[in-house]
Image (cartoon, rainbow, N blue to C red):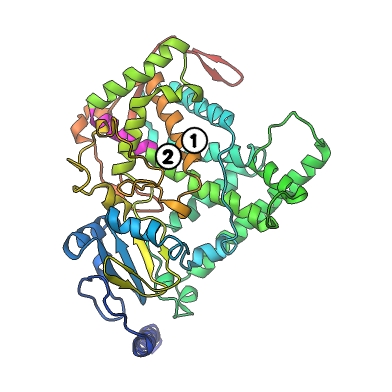
Amino acid sequence: MDKLLPLSFTFLVFIFMVFKLWMRSIIKETPKILPPAPWKLPIIGHLHLLIFALPHQRLAELAKRHGSLMHLQLGELPHVVVSSPEAAKEVMKTHDINFANRPFLLGAEIVLYNLSDIGFAPYGSHWREEEVSSLITSIFCNTGSEINLGEMLCNLSYNITLRTALAGRCKLQHETLIPILKEFIDALGGFSITDLFPSVKFLPMISGMKAKLERFHHDLDVMLKSIIEERRASNTNLGNSDDETDDLLDVLLNLQDHGGLEFPLTTDNIKDVILDMFIGGTETSSTVVEWAMSEIMKNPRVLQNVQAEVRQVYDRTGDVNESDLHELEYLKLVIKETLRLHPPLSLLIPRENSERCEINGYEIPTKNKVIVNAWAIGGDSNYWSEAERFIPERFINSSVDYKGANFEFIPFGARRRICPGMSYGMAVVKLSLAKLLSHFDWKLPNGMKNEDLDMTEAFGASVRKKSELYLIPTPYHLGMTVERDGGQYY
């Protein structure tokens, strides 16, 4: 009898969901003309089409059959999937204000202080320089050995963000804060069943998702509260000392104490901005660098060209610093082409319309989730010749950029909802690649050929390589000098 209880409970949940959705379908006003849609199943809608597939790739395949503006029912929620520059422009520019809202996400409400964050600006170029130099030192100490470059880049991104946000002055950094952040960011990837069936109020409880998110929130909140209190005490003791360079936390605390903003800056706002920096500025930037290095290694011609450029600067100055990056035109082309093929968010963060509107002759009902497939748009053969190939030269003499004005190239979104950490993340990407390519020659391990490098994708908070990038570094100059433990290492 006891063995039948879980089955009976599951059946009752199923019947309840069927009844709820049936009632909603009766009272819901049907719009005139929805965008085209594939055949769907009862209850789950089109969810079955995304099983066992990378969502951005499957959605791109469906768009080729059903159109660049496509209607999907994922769970009980209607979605519109945008897969062309024209449709993206309609959503992000023509109807920008209408689609400026973000839909409800349980994780954001619980962990991110009910979306109380504010935009942030890039800080701390000197910290980027120091942390990238530390990475170069670590690689140099492993000369001739196979290294997991992907893992090292991920750690670099966290360290830079930690220095930028907190100046690396909190005692809890690597031991507790970063592991929890990594776990939370991993949990953000994909579609959450609790968000797709919001009317089933007990689903977050029985799925365990609510308890998991509340644990994330509690652990992060305790640590951030401790960090803020410790900083306040430290700043009080130091007074107006100029010995320490202000980090983002110092700036935010100063704004909170002395005003200067049009709205009150709460402590929860400050916590959320810090979390925003880690979520938006860590895995995304490390993922872009890993993809760029992978594409460079897979294309020897590109490797030769980009290394020749960065080493012109290196040979003249003895290093490549942020002040030199404006000279590296070919490196900029490589980064653009990487972002086109491998946008950090293949599916941009969903939007939601506040009122009905019409796009391309189709009616979009109120409160539709809108998913923009940046990966599909970057690979649209109507806009990009040989779209599947890595060809940095396509951007020579081209005004197309990733800053949101060109809707055929929107790896960071566009307009009022463009990624606020774009400039911060790209500074990390440019400096990291310039240093890696100027200081080292690189080869694949175990005699692997360039064309055999695995470029398979894995879906998560950002689209990473399924297999991590292992490379063997050799110093460009055997006599190069790097800093180690307060001294010099040759």
Q: Quadrant of residue 38?
A: bottom left
Q: Quadrant of residue 35?
A: bottom left
Q: Is residue 294 magenta?
A: yes
Instruction: Pick whichever of labels 1 and 2 is earlier in the sequence.
Output: 1
At 58% from the left and 48% from the top, the residue drawn is 177
Residue 33 vs residue 214, the one in the foreground: 33
Q: Amino acid at mark 1?
A: Leu
Q: Measured from the top left, where is residue 135 in percent x and y?
A: 48, 28
Q: Measured from the top left, where is residue 196 in percent x and y?
A: 39, 72
Residue 174 vs residue 194, the one in the foreground: 194
Q: Amino acid at mark 2?
A: Ser
Q: Is residue 383 something one can see in this rendering?
A: yes
At 59% from the left and 34% from the top, the residue drawn is 124
Contact between labelled residues 2 and 1, with CB atoms less than 8 Å apart: yes
At 66% from the left and 44% from the top, the residue drawn is 249
> What's the magenta region?
289-299
Kindly report the distance in space between the C-alpha atoms of the residues bearing marks 1 and 2: 8 Å
Considering only vertical position in the picture, is 23 above or below 37? below
Report the residue marked by disc 2: 286
Report the residue marked by disc 1: 156
